[in-house]
Amino acid sequence: MKLAEALVLRADTQKKIAQLRQRLERVVKVQEGELPAEDPSSLLRELEQTLDEQTEWIRKINRTNATVSFAEGLSISDALAERDRIMQHRKLLGDVLEQASIKQDRFSRSEVKYERTIDVVQIQTKVDALSKAYREYDFRIQELNWRTDLLEE
């Protein structure tokens, strides 16, 4: 099995856990004299089994990510951490740009006038470079996920 397939199966377990939670929330309390639409005990057992399954996928995926080389001196786990750093940096700079671009309307001379304290063009150039770096990292990670066999043990 390829790493990418295991990632899809892990995502499936995450969705199933969310669905089981919703189903449980609907049946843990009923009006006196009523019966729940589903058996809560059965749902709890299914939830525990699905959590165990998810944990097993996570272990195998993490083991594979930590072991397989992404680039010289970097594992897939290292690449994921770097990709996340790039995404966070890009998001933070994007938020700064958003604040710098908020238009302040002045209706009289007595109202406060705001001025930018940053070089918007320079930061936008950095955001664009980070976006490109993120896309490149993500593409290489996805490609490797489809070429890498999942480590079972």
Image: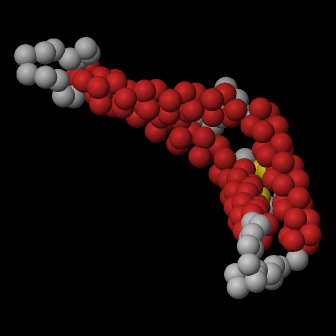
Residue 5: image x %, image y %?
Answer: 66, 28
Establish if 118 lies above or below 39.
below
Residue 144: image x %, image y %?
Answer: 79, 40
Establish if 13 lies above or below 34.
below
Q: Image point 50% across, 30% down: which residue?
A: 15
Quarter of the N terminus within the rendering: top right
Horizontally, residue 28 falls left or right of residue 93, namely left
Q: Image point 84% across, 48% down: which residue?
A: 135
Res 129 seen here: yes
From the viewer's side, name the closer residue of 93 and 109: 109
Counting the numbered discs, the total is 0
Q: Image point 34% across, 24% down: which residue?
A: 23
Residue furthest to the front = 108
Horizontally, residue 34 falls left or right of residue 77, namely left
From the viewer's side, name the closer residue of 47 and 147: 47
Establish if 5 lies above or below 135.
above
Horizontally, residue 42 falls left or right of residue 7, namely left
Residue 19: image x %, image y %?
Answer: 43, 27
Horizontally, residue 138 falls left or right of residue 110, namely right
Residue 59: image x %, image y %?
Answer: 52, 42
The quarter of the displayed image where residue 17 is located: top left
Res 144 seen here: no
